[in-house]
Amino acid sequence: MVSAFVPVGLAGCVSGPQQPFEARTPVHQNAAFLSMYDERPDERHPLPATDIDEVETRFLRQEVDYRTPERPGTIVVDTSARYLYLVRENGRAIRYGIGVGKQGMSWRGRATVARKAEWPRWTPTAAMIAREPERNARWAGGMAGGIENPLGARALYLYQGNQDTLYRIHGTSEPWSIGKAVSSGCIRLFNQDIIDLYSRVPTGTPVVVLNRNPIGEPEIDETDAPLPPDDI
């Protein structure tokens, strides 16, 4: 059962119920949310504020009631509901809104955060370059981290044992895609949210990816968007 929620400020792929829609308070009047998604000038690549005026409140970072048998410290990704939960003590969790790409909808199971990266590098695969050389060939040697990089400000790399699942939890240069099913990528969060999550979870963190729905058509057109992050 989900009830009260509070905004969660910045810190130093077993199901809970899908969350009901909460009545939206005009975000521009909520100082806590504005501060949460404000600019981050001290980042390696200074991060501008995220415009959240048109974002549904339920997709903004907040602490909620969340009943689950998973241990505190576990990440639970509910791809169908478009939420990521970081389980806390006493039936609570920090909930983040997510965008789910085709790769994100194609896998479910348990994994571990084996690697973390700040402002990660992105490299298209040979298949991506062959499919759209005009778009991707120039990045054959990799795209350096930065504001326009498809992986955003941080990335968490999920492994099962020593095997890379190729499943990533990462930031995004397209904040309008949060809460949507999109045509590319894995699990994306607002850059300010992936920075927050990154700061809270160490390597070795267990991850549960729930996926109750089959892959469907994307809800938004990404014709001009970067292709999926297939990073090194």
Image (cartoon, rainbow, N blue to C red):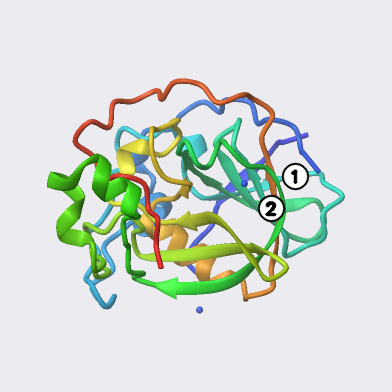
How many numbered marks, from 0 up? 2
From the viewer's side, name the closer residue of 183 and 131: 131
Answer with left or right where residue 205 lies relative to residue 142. Answer: right
Residue 127: x percent and y percent? 34, 47
Dot 2 amino acid type: Ala
SS assignment at label 1: loop
Dot 1 amino acid type: Tyr
SS assignment at label 2: strand
Asked whether residue 178 is in view, the answer is yes
Q: CA distance from mark 2 to mark 1?
A: 6 Å
From the viewer's side, name the closer residue of 210 and 94: 210
Residue 222: x percent and y percent? 27, 32
Find disc 1 in the rendering and name its residue. Answer: 66
Structural crowding at the residue carrying mark 1, measured as other residues with C-alpha within 10 Å and reported as few (<14), some (14–19) or many (≥20): many
Find disc 2 in the rendering and name its residue. Answer: 93
Asked whether residue 28 is in view, the answer is no
Residue 176: x percent and y percent? 31, 37
Residue 25: x percent and y percent? 43, 32
Q: Which mark is residue 109?
A: none
Going from the N terminus, do you reach mark 2 or mark 1 first? 1
* Image quadrant in which you'd find residue 215: top right
